[in-house]
Image (cartoon, helix red, strand yellow):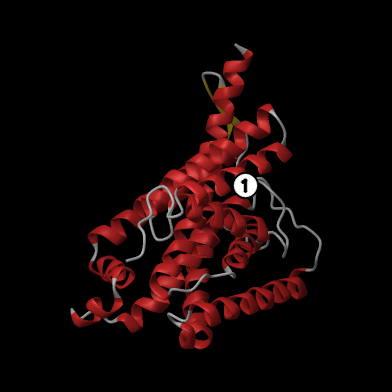
Amino acid sequence: MQTSSLVAQALVNGVIIGLLYLLMAIGFTLVFGVMRIVNFAHGEFYMLGAFFAYLLVSRFQLPFVAAVGAAFVLAVVLGWVIEELVLKPFRHDELNGMIATIGLAMILQAVALMAFGPDPQFMPSVADGSVTLGAVSLPMSRLYVVGFSVAVLLTLYVFLGHTRTGRALRAVVQDTEIATAQGVRARLMYPLGFGIGVGLAAIAGALMAPLFSVSPFIGATPLLKAFIVVILGGLGSIPGAALASLLLGVTESAASTFISNSIAEILIFALVMAMLVIRPTGLLGRAET
């Protein structure tokens, strides 16, 4: 009975972690799909989202849900401005664009370090108590993560699939030249795609802020996990990212629960290497033609 409870708890924790990885990975995939740039500053927008939420809740006393929404809006606006002023010359220039985002990541981290200092900051608890479902106990703060993540993903699905702007953004991701020939204003889709992509990273950071500490250095691990999800799922495949995020989250949670954190990391990278050997395009990715 005890083992079954641990298994159920590990699965639930894995799904929660996977939802956050999915927000990061979809944003990362969206930026690459629109601009053909590997965004090495993606983790820094996760960090900024965590700091935005921390400031809005701790110092301005905003409700947590409002703070997460505001963090998304601020990140989208900041991403739009950065794309127009900094990254515009590097659209579809993979190498130089990658170098530019590395520099951008260093700048954002340095600015956060000067503004907040190197010491970790802790957000007050946003929800007390827990909910017990059978053998699984879920703190209310983690239920916030589940509810908000699902709501964001459903909203993104509706936006991309059932709105004119979302379909235009998908058209640019699939083929910029054909989309432009059909009347899509690609010059507006670039900053919009980048803004939404980094906004999703900011939401993930804001949701994690109450669960862990916030500091200028927290972006590296989420960026690495986003890379792993994209490799496993297939670059440019959102369904692949969803499947890979859940696989990664459950694997990480189960291995950490029953073995150790170190073994969990080894298993994750072994899974990535096996995928690169067996299916380089990822679970649902397609080879370039």
**Residue 189 shown left or right of residue 147 in the figure:** left
Q: Quadrant of the N terminus?
A: top right
Q: 210 above or below 86?
A: above
- Identify the residue at horizontal 29%, vertical 73% (top origin): 175
Q: In this view, does 273 lie above or below 164?
A: above
Residue drawn at 57 percent across, 23 percent down: 7
Residue 141, horizontal then vertical, whole percent: 59, 41
Q: Indicate the amino acid at tag 1.
A: Phe
Q: Mark 1 points at which residue?
A: 269
Report whether residue 157 is seen.
Answer: yes
| Residue 143 visible within the image | no
Q: Residue 82: x and y, percent?
A: 52, 81
Identified at 44% across, 49% down, the residue is 279
* Res. 235 image quadrant: bottom left
Q: In which quarter of the image is residue 202?
A: bottom right
Crowd rating for badge 1 (residues with CA inside 10 Å; few <14, some 14–19, many 20+): few
Quarter occupied by the C terminus: bottom left
